[in-house]
Amino acid sequence: MKKNDLCTGTVQRVDFPGKGIVACGDSLCTVKNVIPGQTVEFRVKKKKNGRWQGTLLSLLSPSVLEKRQPLCSLFPGCGGCLYQTMDYEDQLSMKLAQVKRLLLPVVTRQDLSPADAEALFTGISGSPEELGYRNKMEFTFGDAEKDGPLTLGLHKKNSNYDILPVTDCAIVHPDFNKIVTAVQAYFREIGGVYYHKMTHKGVLRNLLVRRAVSTGEILIGLVCTTQDSYPLYPLVQQLLSLPLEGRICGILQMENDSVADVVKSSRTRVLFGRDYLNEKLLGLSFRISPFSFFQTNTKGAEVLYRTAAAFIGDVKDALVFDLYSGTGTIAQMLSASAGRVIGVEIVEEAVQAARENAAANGIGNCTFIAGDVLKVLDDLAERPDYLILDPPRDGIHPAALPKIISYGAERIVYISCKPTSLARDLDILLSSGYRAEEIRCVDMFPETVHVETVCLLTHS
């Protein structure tokens, strides 16, 4: 096997996140966007860390794991739901196996036998809803082909420019599909122009939609540049007249003149209703603004947080640090029994939301601090009894880990959305006196390559 070779092979397995290991002759190559058992054609691209990497060209024959038809018309074009032709139980088994392959070599360094190391893994919890679970989507204006009609939808797989129209996305509530279809039709009718990332000219950039599971409230945000303006109140009336299962509680116009390809707002105007929606999670109330961090699978988040609470155990009268606390969901959940909970989060908007939500829930023993965990820990004189760690995808900053370890907290619960980052941090924690006691996966993202992992560590 060498660079630019055209190869055919069978996918032996898929490692996290969606990296297929394909056999071609006596060589192995990593190819993305595949399923175990598929026969694929690929082009060898380069060698990295001793393994060849290739680009998928075509699917020659399906896998025996592909037991059902695609769930939406975009498959496999958008690349978001790679596994939707697999039964859900097979998806769960594959994700658990991926996490085990990553973490078993790490936990066996605790002088455990293979059987004892295997016993640390207590399975995987599936999402309560396999389909229609996403509560937030960011759609993009563009075209499906160069100089084609205006399109509002999702990026085509491996493309920064081509936008695929969304009519029947399977992982969102049908209300999302009705809204995006109506907005696309409106701007096509009035001749709306999308923002071109290369020329930085145009108006229409994104459509942000959030929907609360418990209340059915829907918040819609239209992101535009200030280069021109369009009549929006007719659009508001059209949206309000849609036959939705939920109820639109707010429609917003957001200004974004940044050249960066990011969904944000420098100025927000309320066209209808209010600029937030109300959601309930584990009996707690949350006010969610357009850009507030909130788990995208509400019912799955309840499973995740219950798992974390079960792992941390009895926190009666204890001081708990919730690092990377987001909008303070876990902190508020633990507050009923803990003495005090201190949450640290770098996103100021999330911290403000956490404070407001705690006040609305009548919780007085939670303190939320805005700042980088790395720096905030230097200013905290108190030492926690227990720690909750829920870092971003890249894991804990290497300089913050020694500070966290120095507390010598009796128990640590590490929640990870990227098992490769967990494997790196876990190796350091285990070499510093901690022991892994239990590891469980929680699938928050059915049909996709992603999975959450919860790990309980105790101080030896």
Image (cartoon, grey):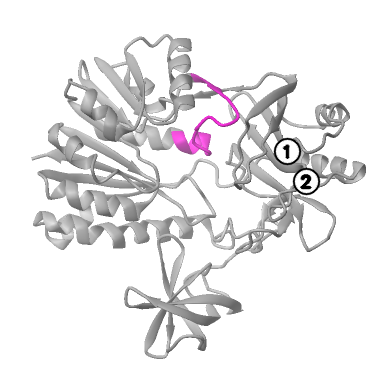
Label 2 sits on what residue type? Gly
Placement of 45 over or under 437, stated as above or below:
below
Q: Quadrant of the C terminus?
A: top left
Q: Does the magenta stretch include residue 290?
A: yes
Q: Position of residue 3 (x, y in %)?
A: 46, 85
Q: In which quarter of the image is the N terminus?
A: bottom left
Contact flag, marks 2 and 1 (Cβ < 8 Å): yes
Residue 249 seen by the camera: no
Seen as rendered, the residue at the extreme right is 189
Closer to the camera in the image, 203 or 200: 200
Q: Name the residue under label 1.
A: 225
Q: Position of residue 417 (x, y in %)?
A: 40, 46
Residue 24 as seen in the image, left or right of residue 267:
left
Q: Position of residue 88 (x, y in %)?
A: 51, 55
Quadrant in which residue 253 is drawn: top right
Tell me the residue at 46%/20% (across/down): 352
